[in-house]
Amino acid sequence: WTVDGKLIKTLKGHSNKVISVSFSPDGKTIASASADNTIKLWNLDLDKLMVEGCDWLQQDYLIQHPQTLEELQVCQTPQMFVEAASTLVTEGEALAQRGDYEEAVAKLKKAKTWNSKLDFNPEIKAAPAFVYQGRELAQEGDIEGAVAKFKQAQQLDANIDLNPETKELEQNPQAVARTIYLNAETYEQ
């Protein structure tokens, strides 16, 4: 077990309960005494255990959970970072779609540091966050605030669709804000 209570390895071999355990001075061997009248010596190479654990986790888990990869320094390899960068991009895009520009940019920038071959501008890729924020403001009746957010999105990405729920490309901030507001008003009635 680790100091914070996480299981590292289960040592099996005694046929009865263990009554005493001691570590060697170098910490690489454990001696266990059992009620089965045996003493066992266990080779405890933590580095090797950690490498085995990383090998087990690399079966897509670390790629799909980049925060865990960041925490497990022993598991970090350049290839793991490159592969996990795509998950960071997906997470960043999802944050932008939910209106969280700052977090989206942070994730997207991290993805680019993990994979230098990614070719995008994090600020532009996160521009949909301002569309989301503008839509929220328009639904609340703050047309001026909505227009300002839509214009922020357009400053980052001149071709951004301000109303992705329609089939046409809509780029007029005032018209989109009014349409969203009117639709919200109609829905409430």
Image (cartoon, rainbow, N blue to C red):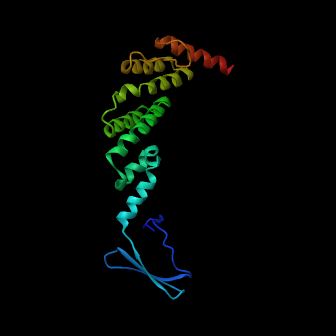
Quarter holding residue 111: top left
| Vertical position of residue 167 compared to residue 24: above or below | above
Image coordinates for residue 180, horizontal then vertical, percent: 56, 17
Give the x, y percent position of residue 96. Answer: 45, 30
* In the foreground, 135 or 5: 5
* Nearer the observer, 183 or 50: 50
The image quadrant where one finds the N terminus is bottom left
Residue 118, placed above or below residue 156: below
Residue 98 lies, with reference to residue 37, above or below; the image says above
The C terminus - image quarter? top right
Where is residue 62? Give x, y as percent. 43, 48
Q: Nearer the viewer, residue 88 or 50?
A: 50
At x 52%, y 19%, the residue is: 164
Residue 170: x, y in percent?
49, 12
Is 20 positioned to the left or the right of 115 in the image? right
Count the marks.
0
- Residue in the image at 47% along x and 34% along y: 95
Single out the residue that lies furthest toward the right.
189
Query: Looking at the image, which residue is at 61% across and 16% down?
Result: 183
